[in-house]
Amino acid sequence: MFGKLTIDALPLYSDIAMGGALITVFGAFGLVVLITWLGQWRYLWTEWLTSLDHKKIGILYVMLALLMLVRGFIDAMMMRTQQAVALDSDGYLSPEHFDQIFTSHATIMVFFVAMPFLVGLFNVVVPQQIGARDVAFPFMNSVSLWLTASGAALVMTSLVIGNFSTAGWAAYPPYSEVQFSPSVGVDYWIWAILVSSVGSMLTAINFLVTIVKRRAPGMRLMMMPVFTWTALCTSILMVFAFPALTVAAALLGLDRYLGMHFFTDGDGGSAMTYINLFWMWGHPAVYILLLPAFGVHSEVVATFSGKRLFGYESLVYATAIITVLSLIVWLHHFFSMGGSSDVNAFFGRVAPLVAAPSGVMIFDWLFTMYRGRVQFSVPMLFTLGFIVTFVIGGMTGVLLAVAPVDYLMHNTTFLVAHFHNMMIPGALFGYFAGYQYWFPKAFGFRLQEKWGRRAFWAWIVGFYLAFIPLYILGFMGMPVRLERSYLAGWQPYLIVAEFGALSILCGIIFLAVQLAVSIRDRATLAVSTGDPWNGRTLEWATASPPAAYNFAVVPHVRGIDAWWEMKQAGTAGHRPARFHDIIMPDNSSAGVILGAMSFVFAFAMVWQIWWLTAVGGFGMFAAVLWQTFRDHAGHRILASEVEAIQNGRTMAAALAPGAPT
Amino acid sequence: MSTSPHGGEVTIKRYLVGGVLAFVLTAIPFGLVAARTLRPTPIFVVIGLTAVTQVLVHLRYFLHLDLKPLSQNKLIALCFAAVVLLVLLGGTLWIMFDLNYRTDVGGGEVMRL
Amino acid sequence: MTDAVITAGPREQTGAEEAERAIDEKVYGFWIYLTSDAIIFALLFVIFLVMSRNTGDGPGGPMLFRLPHTFVATMLLLASSMTFGFASVAIAAGQRWVTLAWLGVTFLLGLGFLAMQISELYGMAVAGAGPWRSGFLSALFTLVGTLGTHVSVGLVWIVVLGCELALRGLNPFVASRLCRLGLFWHFLDIVWVGIFSIVYLPRIL
């Protein structure tokens, strides 16, 4: 009746695991109680959960990312602490539990923090940057969001019911096969990946079509903001890379569920096929995470240097070259796994070529700052921290790309330090900068500066303290994923790393405090115009927060930095002569229902409750069917309404202190 | 004669011509395999050539992909995809062949292409 | 220069233009989806090639397939592509019921193809050559099975679209959906050309 699900699925094997489960359950329960007590279910449902507004969908993505960042960080904190204390002792975590933690930490950070964060920023910003009213496929946008949330919910559920995979975030076979991982952990991983990958693919298609087809009249490709360029290239990467991950996870699933022999130990299976497939996705994946961050930094540097971006064309070409290069170098993730020197030499020579376009980008940003009037706002601080620290990580990457060196460094903490050097100052600081930069656009009030600065310093100091020791430990030979320490000589470094983690904990707390304080003081921090930073690109032409339709009148674009050009020409604040009716899509509950049904389906698949999979599968099909039959449901906003909305905003802007005349 | 939403000319004739061509391009390899009149290697070559040609026939007559400006966007996307696929598939074959040669995985036989 | 000249954007699009643009976007988006699907099939093909010798202790290719069976299946699918083409002509000419008729024929031909594939795979499994036997068979079943799954989805889609056409009649949106289904259906036939050329024919030889 319930497949493999029994009472033993509850995490009674460990107090800590039980604690995690209880926090999750009571957290979710508490949220439900809070919303009920505030009487906000209707509001939540009509304004947010069923909304097809790309700005709201983007905000929900970022909220998901920040929430999962806390969960993923708790995993990190637990690991750091275990390693700091467990010399000649068992520490406080069992090996099995530790293995689940390093697996869930990475899975969550890549799939449920970084991906939703960048997709969220795309959603809020890109349509506005290209002068569009919406993305090309608003309903598919909603589906993508809820599929991603469903995947995250699966991972969180594994904390409470059953256990998560212990096979690492890459789930290498044969360990991840049923023979060595009989529990449901790897199944949770497979289904979380499959469900959220579909969401990512749909997002990629959506933004590709939006950027190619919905730019404002006059906006040629070489006039798009750099962030939009990175969105385009990231979408291309997603379309080409995610199929490999889908195939890898699906075939692993076929091995586990139907006893097939793709990657098994014997009977014609080949584990290296999996590894080849996984990294065919895995290398483009890291550029999927990094390119949007580069895009954010480009925007931030230009705005806060008060200058046009230096070398716009070179930035675009560099982005394109990185995109192409990232598709053809994936073997450098498995140099040491049996290939010949010919194979290793080819990939080992092509992989570090990415340093060239990356270097070009860095110099472009530096030259933008040169002779500009640099303001050290919080977004700018994150960008500066990124520029300095990312270069270090890049150099260690070039070092690792030398195959003989990789043979020594492979599986040591040097590698861990390298990729965290890329992901934290590289990707995460970029997302944080974007979050700080575009928050006023999304909500109409700024984030408070003081706590933002504190958060930045806590993060960057924390990063260095946590990961520089790991480089050194890597040189000293410490392997990855150890649940206890073996050499006393390692301890000092592990303890320093623990302090780094504590500093990052402060950084996260400061970000939360910043948000709370900003909401509390939102009247003082309000922005009356749409343009609090004196920005250059079109998203600053809309109000903050924008009307549902973004632009009352679709702008005509004449060049790069379209908004700046309009401000210089004096046409920025003027009322249009005529307004027109605008048609916007209706809300739809089919998206959130599809997401919920996908969760039911995947959960039932994990526990092999076949009747429930039929329910979930049918529910997904029904949601799609329902939506197709009510497709093109939209509502008309009359020209008079548009005019009234715009008048309201113009009044507010004119009355605000310091408004431009 | 009318235009379809994807810009080609939609006529019965087009589909008939495409169908007949596809049929011929199918009958040739099947016939050769049935009759076994040639050695294996030339038959493989014929199979490959007829397959590629038939795919092109499908693209042109059924999917309305031609060299006209309306199709150019799609052609560019297709060509880019083809190049990327060449790298991914070629790279995979090279890597796996290399590994199979150096290890005993998968039954121990050297994969002959 | 007056405000009107500087600040007014181009004439807002009319409803018909909006609809046309929406349809154009959907077709373009669908091509991109097909690209990703093509990559999935390409990867399954290459995995099949890589594992074509991994027969373990199970049977290899030559004894598994029968040429006449494969030929009939190929003809069914090719015919269904043509009949779908006739449906496309009919809908472009505004003939609702002719379109439905050709869709019905396409459905039956596709169903026939699917039935032949299922019976073949089932027969192999029952005879001890199932996907759990060896890596080669896993790859074979998965490649052919994935195509079969796509064909099944296509058949369901034909039914749904047929219902919409019957209930709601002809309009640009239904025509556009038929167009996209057509892209999907022809794409599947292309994949089948690859399958019989790479999987069946070389092994029957």
Image (cartoon, coloured by chain):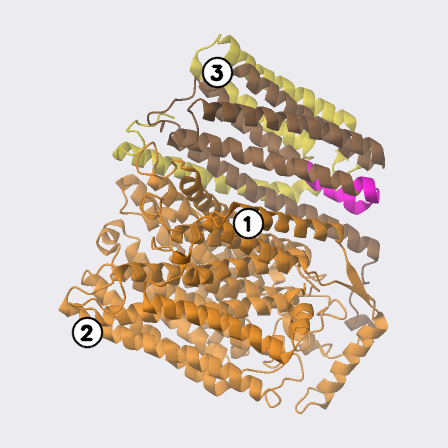
Chain colours: A orange, B yellow, C brown
Which percent across, then down, holds residue A96?
29, 58
Q: Mark 1, residues whose alpha carbon is within 10 Å: few (<14), some, or many (≥20)?
A: many
Closer to us: mark 3 or mark 1? 1
Of residue C199 and residue A226, the one placed in the foreground of this image is C199
Q: Which residue is mark 2?
A: A492
- The amino acid sitting under disc 1 is Leu
Residue beneath the point at 35% across and 63% down: A12
Closer to us: mark 2 or mark 1? 1
Q: Which residue is mark 1?
A: A612
Label 3's element?
helix
- Give the numbered dot on residue B43: 3
Report if the CB atoms under discs 2 and 1 are less than 8 Å apart. no
Please identify the dominant SS of the magenta region: helix
Magenta residue span: C165-183
- The amino acid sitting under disc 3 is Ile
Q: Is residue A640 above or below residue C46?
A: below
Q: Is residue A574 left or right of residue A437?
A: right
Distance Cα–Cα, label 3 vs label 2: 68 Å
